[in-house]
Amino acid sequence: MGRPRAVAGPAHQRAGGAVVVVKGRVGKRDDAPKLIAHSIDVVEVGDSDAEPLRVRVPPQLLSKATVAHLKQILADHPGPAPVFLHLGERQVVRLPDQWNVDTSNGLLGQLRVVLGAGAIVA
């Protein structure tokens, strides 16, 4: 995989379906948590044999404690599979390669315990 590169130009000029890394924070000012982006980088996805792990993170569970726990679980299962977080219904974030995981060693069960039975997106 190549290094992420900065996205340039207005949003309507970006390629549809591109994988991006969004750095930001979660804002909870309104009823539903929102991702407030500080930077967006396009990721050049290379050829990988590992199926990506797609994890649904319910917005109501987003907290510093949950994020810290999720980071620890992912760090404990390093491997080749890229990780995509589905935040609510419309936001999907691909984590940087340092968070790639091995999905064959109990990781999925741990994620279900922390995030609920529907945590793994099929």
Image (cartoon, helix red, strand yellow):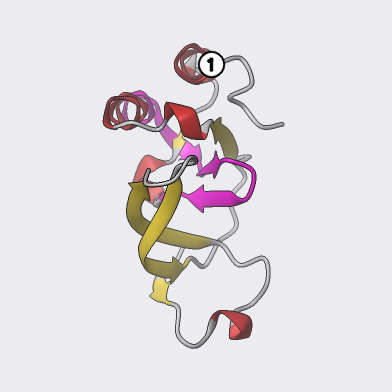
From where the camera sits, is residue 76 visible? yes
Res 3 seen here: no
**Rendered location of residue 30, percent (x, y):** 44, 46
Q: Mark 1: give few (<14), some (14-19) or many (20+) Cα within 10 Å.
A: some
Identify the residue at the far front of this view.
30
Q: Secondary structure at mark 1?
A: helix
Q: Is residue 32 above or below residue 114?
A: below
Q: Amino acid at mark 1?
A: Arg
Q: Nearer the viewer, residue 42 or 117?
A: 117
Taking the image as shown, residue 52 lies to the left or right of residue 26, namely: right
Residue beneath label 1, please? 112
Compared with 48, 55 (above or below) is above
Magenta stretch encompasses residue 76:
yes
Q: In this image, 85 relative to 36: left or right?
A: right
In this view, the residue in front, 15 or 34, is 34
Q: Residue drawn at (58%, 24%), measured in percent from left and top? A: 119
Q: Position of residue 17 (x, y in %)?
A: 67, 65
Residue at x 46% of width, y 14% of height: 110
Region of the chain picked out in magenta, as a range: 73-95
Q: Position of residue 65 (x, y in %)?
A: 28, 25
Image quarter of the C terminus: top right
- Tell me which residue sits at (41%, 59%) in the image: 22
Say whether residue 119 is magenta. no
Asked if residue 14 is positioned above or below residue 112 in the image, the reply reads below
Where does residue 33 sit, x and y in percent of width and height? 45, 42
Residue 86 occupies quadrant: top right
Foreground of the two, 61 or 101: 61
